[in-house]
Image (cartoon, helix red, strand yellow):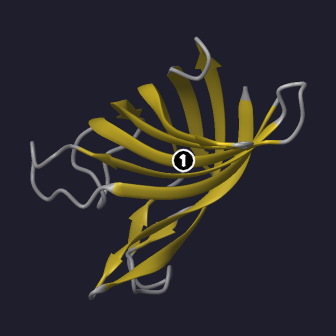
Amino acid sequence: MLLGVGTTFGPSFRRLAWTSAVVVPLQLELDESRWELGAFRFASAQSVPGYPLATIRAANPYWGLTAMRRWQVLHRGRMKLYLGFGANYRTEVDYLEPTRWNFAWLIAVRCDLDRHGHVLELGVRHWSDAWIKEPNRGQNLLALSFGF
């Protein structure tokens, strides 16, 4: 099980911009981290990338749920690199995504802290409907999680 804290970001005029949200992820891993079930609480509102929150609100606080297959693609000492792909459900439709169901992908770096299964993981995630319905802006998040 992993519990963490993170934030959101998005593209803005040829650069990445923070969108001011606090994200609290809770992930349950199964079968030696091959599968993941996750609940993500977006605890604060998000702004449109590149604009202050007071100007244009992109999303209100909401919940996101994921089911994902993860692959460990690199293992060097205590460090591991994971790639993941799966599905995501959002409890709201907003400026970022016009659909509740989305595809989800993950790139994560994990460090084993000790022999008791404690880990630290830094993950970048993207949720998108892959242009099923326009506009497809997507949801991006960066999270640091502690596993126990």
The image shows residue 56 at horizontal and vertical percentages of: 38, 78
- Left or right: 96 with respect to 49? left
- Regarding residue 100, the answer to whether it shows in the image is no
The image shows residue 93 at horizontal and vertical percentages of: 31, 46
**SS category of the residue bearing label 1:** strand
- Left or right: 147 with respect to 58? right
The residue where tag 1 is placed is 108
- Regarding residue 7, the answer to whether it shows in the image is yes
The tally of labels here is: 1
Q: Which residue appears farthest toward the top when viewing the image?
A: 31
The image shows residue 143 at horizontal and vertical percentages of: 62, 54
Q: Is residue 9 above or below residue 1?
A: below
- What residue is drawn where x is 40% and y is 86%? 50
Corner quadrant of residue 39: top right
Within 10 Å of disc 1 (Cα), the crowding (few <14, some 14-19, many 20+) is some
Amino acid identity at mark 1? Ala
Name the quadrant of the N terminus: top right
- What residue is drawn where x is 35% and y is 39%? 104
Name the quadrant of the C terminus: top right
- Left or right: 95 with respect to 125? left
The residue lying toward the viewer, choosing from 126 and 44, is 126
The residue lying toward the viewer, choosing from 99 and 75, is 75
- What residue is drawn where x is 45% and y is 30%? 71
- Left or right: 56 with respect to 107? left
- What residue is drawn where x is 27% and y is 51%? 97
The image shows residue 48 at horizontal and vertical percentages of: 38, 75
Q: Which residue appears farthest toward the front when viewing the image?
A: 77
